[in-house]
Amino acid sequence: MLTVNQNRVIMSAKVEIYTWSSCPFCLRAKALLREKQIEFTEYCIDGDNAARMAMTERANGRSSLPQIFIDDQHIGGCDDIYALDRAGKLDQILYS
Ligand SMILES: N[C@@H](CCC(=O)N[C@@H](CS)C(=O)NCC(=O)O)C(=O)O
């Protein structure tokens, strides 16, 4: 995927996030991605139990929202993506 970052066009990873519209953790996770100017695909699954079950299977049993995937690799939820960022590992995954 092509992303504009600090006025440069660069390659970045495919980012997907499953959300509920009124979930504070989801809003927080999306805020981090937006802050980094990362484009992402959002699957808002409000009230869709079948979609939640499919997400849970893809997320190795994790059923809380959000669940985040980068290039089809399961990252986890909001706390996980912030922890990766604090550890300086998120940019590495996004731009490798
Ligand atoms: N530690 C998780 C917390 C996520 C969380 O608790 N999300 C709520 C929605 S805001 C949830 O999925 N709760 C489980 C449920 O309602 O079944 C994270 O950082 O993503």
Image: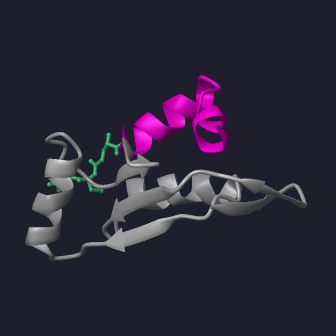
Residue drawn at x 70%, y 52% is 36
Is residue 35 at least partly visible in the picture?
yes
Residue drawn at 65 percent across, 52 percent down: 12
Furthest toward the right, the residue is 7
**19 is higher (above) or lower (below) than 46:** above
Q: Position of residue 29 (x, y in %)?
A: 49, 52
Q: Quadrant of residue 74?
A: top left
Quadrant holding the N terminus: bottom right
Q: Describe residue 4's horizontal placement relative to residue 7 as left or right.
A: left
91 lies left or right of 80: right
Is 76 magenta? The answer is yes
Residue 95 at x, y percent in the picture: 67, 42
Identify the image quadrant of the C terminus: top right
In this view, the residue in front, 7 or 20, is 7
| Vertical placement of residue 68 versus 73, above or below | below
Residue found at the far bottom of this picture: 47
- The answer to whether 86 appears left or right of 9 in the picture is left
* Coloring basis for residues: one colour
Q: Of residues 90 and 9, which is closer to you in this image?
A: 9
For the record, the magenta segment spans: 74-96
Classified by dominant secondary structure, the portion drawn in magenta counts as helix
Q: Is residue 80 above or below residue 17?
A: above
Percent position (x, y) of residue 92?
64, 32
Residue appearing at x 59%, y 22% in the figure: 87
